[in-house]
Amino acid sequence: MLEKFFGVFLKKQFSSIESSTLDLQKNLISYPALEIIRKLKKSGWDAFIVGGAVRDLLMKVKPKDFDIVTNASPHEIKSIFRRSRIIGRRFRIVHVYIANETIEVSTFRKSNVSNSLDSYGRILRDNAFGSIEDDVKRRDLTINSLYYDPVSERILDYHNGISDLKRREIVVIGKTKERLIEDPLRIVRIIRIAAKLDLTIPLKLKKVMRRAGSLLENIPKARLSDDLLKLFVSGKSLQGFKYILELDLDKHIFPNLALFLPEKKRGVANLKKDGFIYTALKNLDVTVCNNESISLSFIFAVLFWEKISRLKMSYVEQGISEYISMQKATSEILQDINQNFYFQRKHITGVRELCLLQSRFNKFLGKSPFSLIRHARFRSALKLLELRVKLNEVKIETVVWWDKFYNCPDSEKIQMVNSMRGKTGQRRSYKKRRRKKLSTI
Ligand code: ATP
Ligand code: MG
């Protein structure tokens, strides 16, 4: 009786809304996600698409991935899907493989916050099974806590997420400060999601984010790098980057380097329109929106370039050759950055190559131009060269020359190189080596 009585109140804690009244884009749901929910429900379990995917479907954006939650345990899920695997040591979730897609299916989870915080207030364990009500509480934002059942075509909304989405506003579930301290990565997630969907971050929330910013220094670098990368490839990197500067987070993301913008110029007011980084990120966003491939090495090379270039110049001034100076500067800056940022080896190699290739753009004679345009990273290196015009490091004529040289027929290439003789102040780039006489024994 008592349970029934309280049940009425509990039921009132959420609204169940027919998705057809909300213009949810069902056609953007992947077939495997639908199939998994159908099967789980057919076996008698509850199952929902949850989180970012529901948010994106309501905003008419194609979700990047589909997360599914259910009240079935990992073993029960596994028994339903032949091609599936239980993964994770701390919290067990199931990967279900259908038609070349891997979909993550998790059991409702609860966080035992009270007894699992570290000395910073960060959450350590988040690994007990729970009810849907528990599951909803551990999610970060109201707009990320919508549960959609595509079979019954209803959305469960526990925190007025739909209304916040309509108002286009980010709202944190629970006590904002505590939730950001609990997991500071949420600061980056807010920025990423606000930028991606053009949502507003209320002033009050911005203040808390700015104050909690230093906590970003304590989270594992692989987690932080992962989310930052998502931001850079979101097609909204410029807006996201503006937030990072506005909230003074760059100094915490790369605490040992005033990266991105030289120290004197820090702050969003100085992200000069049409400047080096502004243009690079704007171009990057266009590339992503056109579904063209992008190179993460290129993005990193752009972000770190001003630092590398300045250090290189200081070596050149000490009388060290251009090439060696560039080599030293790139290695040292990358090593510094590596302390805070998780880099894959291929990206480190990529940044190094892109930087070293810059010194080769001064060589117009001999074989060098021909081998340079054959380099796998030539196009990216040329894009970096073009951006350097913004820093007055390179003349636009140089960029035009290389672009033409790359695109013209071979006969014209030879003419172009010949016509550079005597113009560049450069000596012949290669000498005929005299063969050493073999000594006779
Ligand atoms: P994206 O569009 O980048 O996939 P997303 O919100 O879906 O954005 P995911 O990393 O896919 O991000 O996470 C899925 C869901 O899991 C989120 O929507 C949110 O409900 C929950 N979630 C993820 N990370 C956190 C976190 N750090 N704290 C609380 N909840 C989180
Ligand atoms: Mg997602």
Image: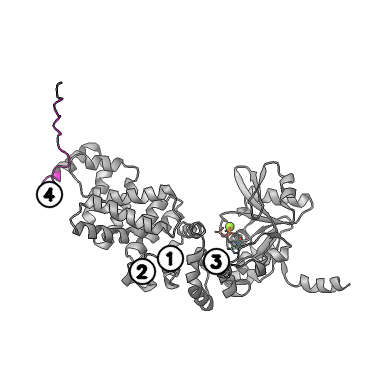
Question: What secondary structure is marked by label 3?
Answer: helix
Among the two numbered marks 4 and 1 on one chain, the one whose residue lies closer to the N terminus: 1
Label 4, residues with CA under 10 Å away: few <14, some 14-19, many ≥20: few
Q: Which residue is mark 2?
A: 271
Q: Which residue is mark 1?
A: 241
Q: CA distance from mark 2 to mark 4?
A: 36 Å
Please tell me which residue lies in front, 409 or 364.
364
Looking at the rendered structure, the kind of residue marked 4 is Lys
Question: What secondary structure is marked by label 2?
Answer: loop
Among the two numbered marks 3 and 4 on one chain, the one whose residue lies closer to the N terminus: 3
Q: Nearer the viewer, mark 3 or mark 4?
A: 3
423 in the magenta segment = yes
| Magenta region | 419-438
Direction from residue 418 to residue 1 in the image, left or right: right
Up/down of 427 relative to 173, above or below = above
Q: Which residue is mark 3?
A: 186
Q: CA distance from mark 1 to mark 2?
A: 9 Å
Question: What secondary structure is marked by label 1?
Answer: helix
Please tell me which residue lies in front, 364 or 91.
91
User: In the rendered structure, are the residues bearing label 2 and label 4 in contact, judged by CB atoms less than 8 Å apart?
Assistant: no
Quadrant housing the N terminus? bottom right
Q: CA distance from mark 3 to mark 2?
A: 24 Å
In the orientation shown, which residue stands out farthest toward the top?
A: 441
Is residue 407 at all visible to an observer of this figure?
no
Looking at the rendered structure, the kind of residue marked 2 is Leu
Q: Which residue is mark 4?
A: 423
Among the two numbered marks 2 and 4 on one chain, the one whose residue lies closer to the N terminus: 2
Q: CA distance from mark 3 to mark 1?
A: 16 Å
Q: At which x and y percent is residue 284?
A: 40, 57
Label 3, residues with CA under 10 Å away: few <14, some 14-19, many ≥20: some
Q: CA distance from mark 3 to mark 4?
A: 55 Å
